[in-house]
Image: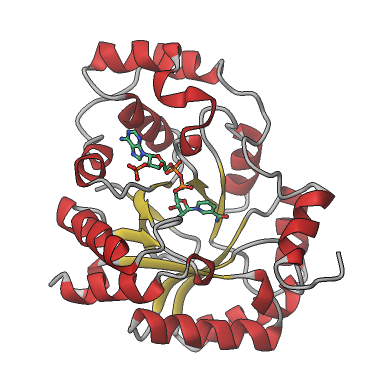
Amino acid sequence: MEFVTLNNGVKMPMVGFGVFQIQDADTTEKAVAEALRTGYRLIDTAEAYGNEEAVGKAIRNSGIPREEIFVTTKVFINHMSYEGAKEAFNESLRKLGLDYIDLYLLHQPVGDTFGAWRALEELYKAGKIRAIGVSNFKEDQIANLSIFNDVVPAVNQIELHVFHQKEEQQAYQTSKGIVTESWGAFAEGHNNVFSNPVLVDIAQKHGKTVAQVMLRWQLQRGVVSLSKSANPERVRQNFDIFDFELSEDDMNHIKTLDTKTSVFADHHEASTVELLAGFVFKKF
Ligand SMILES: NC(=O)c1ccc[n+]([C@@H]2O[C@H](COP(=O)([O-])OP(=O)(O)OC[C@H]3O[C@@H](n4cnc5c(N)ncnc54)[C@H](OP(=O)(O)O)[C@@H]3O)[C@@H](O)[C@H]2O)c1
C-alpha cells in the first residue's frame, strides 16, 4: 500500500474502499470484510449513507488492529452547524462502535459550514479525530474556510475521474498542503466508462481491466482514490493495481477524456444546493 502524509503528519492510504449506495447492512458488512481481507486499509462512509453500524461491525470483527485501519466519515447538511456537527460526530462514533475517527469531513459546502468546522476543530484538538477535512468544496470555499479559522483542512474529497480531471484544483490544493481525494473514481459507470475505447486500449496493453487503469491513473496523479463494489471479485480486482505502471503516453491519452464537467449534479449550481437543502428544509 502507498501512503500520503497529511498536513499534520498523519499517514493516509492512497487507495480506499467506499460504501455509498450499499445500504443493506448485511451486504455492507460483507463488502467491508472482503475489502479488509483484500488489503484495503481506508474505509469511507458517511452519516448520510445509513450504514455506519455495519461498517463498524466489519472493522471490529476483522481482527485487524484498529490503528491499522483509516476510517473516514462525514457530517451531512442536516447537522451542518456547531451543535449539529458535535451531535452528528457522537452519533457516528456510537454507530461505528469506535472511540476515534481518522478523518472527519464536512460532506457538502452547504449550511453553516463555519459553525460545523469550529466543532470539528474542537473535536480534533481534543484528540477524537486524527484529521479534519472537507468534501465537494471549491478553491474559493477552501480559502475562505482556511483563512477565517484555525485549522486548514487536511483533505478535500471531490468528484474526480477521467471525465472530470480537475488538474487545476488539485494543483491549488497541493500548493496549500491539502490532499486531493476522489470520489466516483469510475464515474459510477456513466458515459459507458468501462467500454471507453481509449481506456480499453490501455487496459489491453497492460493486461489489466479498465477499472484498474482508472485507479492506477489516480494513484500516479497523487490522488487518493475511493471506489465501491459489492462484488467480491471486483473488490479484489480494484485493489490489484500496484504491479503495473501507466506510461507518459497512456497518461496523455487519458487526459484527452477530460470534459471538465460533472457527470452528476454539480455542487456549485444553485439547483444542487436547493436539492440538497430540500432534504432538510422544505422551503425550496
Ligand atoms: N463525498 C461525496 O459527496 C461522495 C459522493 C459519492 C461517493 N463518495 C464516496 O466515493 C465512493 C466511490 O464512489 P461511488 O460508489 O459513488 O462510485 P464508483 O466507485 O465510481 O462506482 C461504483 C460502481 O462501479 C461498479 N464497479 C465497481 N468496480 C467495478 C469493476 N471492477 N468493474 C465494473 N464495475 C465496477 C459498482 O458496481 P458493483 O458494486 O456491482 O461492483 C458500482 O456500480 C463511495 O462509495 C463513497 O464512499 C463520496
Apparent side of residue 111 relative to residue 176 in the rendered image (left or right) = right
233 vs 140, nearest the viewer: 233
For image coordinates 40% across by 15% down, the residue present is 250
For image coordinates 60% across by 63% down, the residue present is 107
Apparent side of residue 41 relative to residue 119 in the rendered image (left or right) = left
In the rendered image, residue 67, in percent from the top left (x then y), is placed at: 25, 73
- Residue 215's quadrant in the figure? top left
- Residue 70's quadrant in the figure? bottom left
For image coordinates 56% across by 15% down, the residue present is 256
* 186 versus 4 height, above or below: above
In the rendered image, residue 94, in percent from the top left (x then y), is placed at: 40, 87
For residue 248, say whether it is visible: no
Quadrant the C terminus occupies: bottom right
118 vs 30, nearest the viewer: 30
* Quadrant assignment for ligand 1: top left
- Residue 242's quadrant in the figure? top left
